[in-house]
Amino acid sequence: MPASSKFQLLTEPEPTAAELVDVIDAFYDALPPIASSGESDPGVVFAGYGEPLLRHDVLCDALREIRARRHGIATRVATNGLVDVAVCDALRDAGLRSVTVNFASADPDEYARIMAPRDGRTQGDALAFIERCSELGMEVEATTTRTPGVDIARARELTMALGASAFREREYFP
């Protein structure tokens, strides 16, 4: 991360839902009133130096509290989608309306090589995540990195066929 981003890794332990909401409140409280509503509202994205859905229970608690305190704020999760599909329902019920799913490759073997999923997860889990979120009415953006050898067109076609409403290519940095 460039120094100008002011990005800082979290320290241990991981934050609680209340701590996440407090940070979001502090951010919005520091904005000029016009910047915290309408088109200029930056919204909240749960993403980072790890997979945010590994702690989906905490994330859902934070989403519910954000929705209660700050009506109408756009919220999004950036994920690899390698979770149980039931998590989609929990996210929607907590108020999430938008997800970005990093989809490594339409080829299952290539996907496994790039992502090296754990706990028996596979490309099929990410595809099921995209499909379920779409079925639940969430805005689903799929992204694929221009990794050498990855067929971007196939990744776009597959994710869009499962309900992604947008697709974006990401730059590859070796």
Image (cartoon, rainbow, N blue to C red):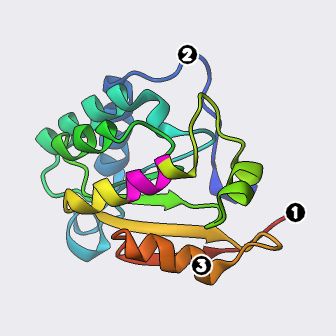
At 46% across and 23% down in the image, what residue appears? 15
| Left or right: 39 as drawn, with respect to 20 | left
The location of residue 49, given as percent across then percent down, is 63, 41
Most extreme residue toward the bottom, as rendered?
153
**Distance between the Cα atoms at labels 1 and 2?**
31 Å
Q: Earlier in the sequence, mark 2 or mark 3?
A: 2
Residue at horizontal 55 percent and vertical 16 percent from the top? 13
Residue at screen point 44% across, 28% down? 55
Secondary structure mostly taken by the magenta-highlighted segment of the chain: helix
32, 52: nearer the viewer: 52
Residue at which label 1 appears: 174
Q: Is residue 83 left or right of residue 93?
A: right
Amino acid type at circle 3 is Arg
Measuring from the top left, give residue 151's x and y in whole percent.
69, 78
Binning the other alpha carbons within 10 Å of mark 3 as few (below 14), some (14 to 19) or many (20 upward) gives: few
Give the quadrant of residue 105: bottom right
For discs 2 and 3, the disc positioned in front in the rendered view: 3
The residue labelled by disc 2 is: 13
Q: As shown in the figure, which amino acid type bears the numbered disc 2?
A: Pro
Magenta residues (range): 125-130
Query: Hey, what amino acid is under mark 1?
Result: Pro
Marks 3 and 1, how far apart in space?
22 Å
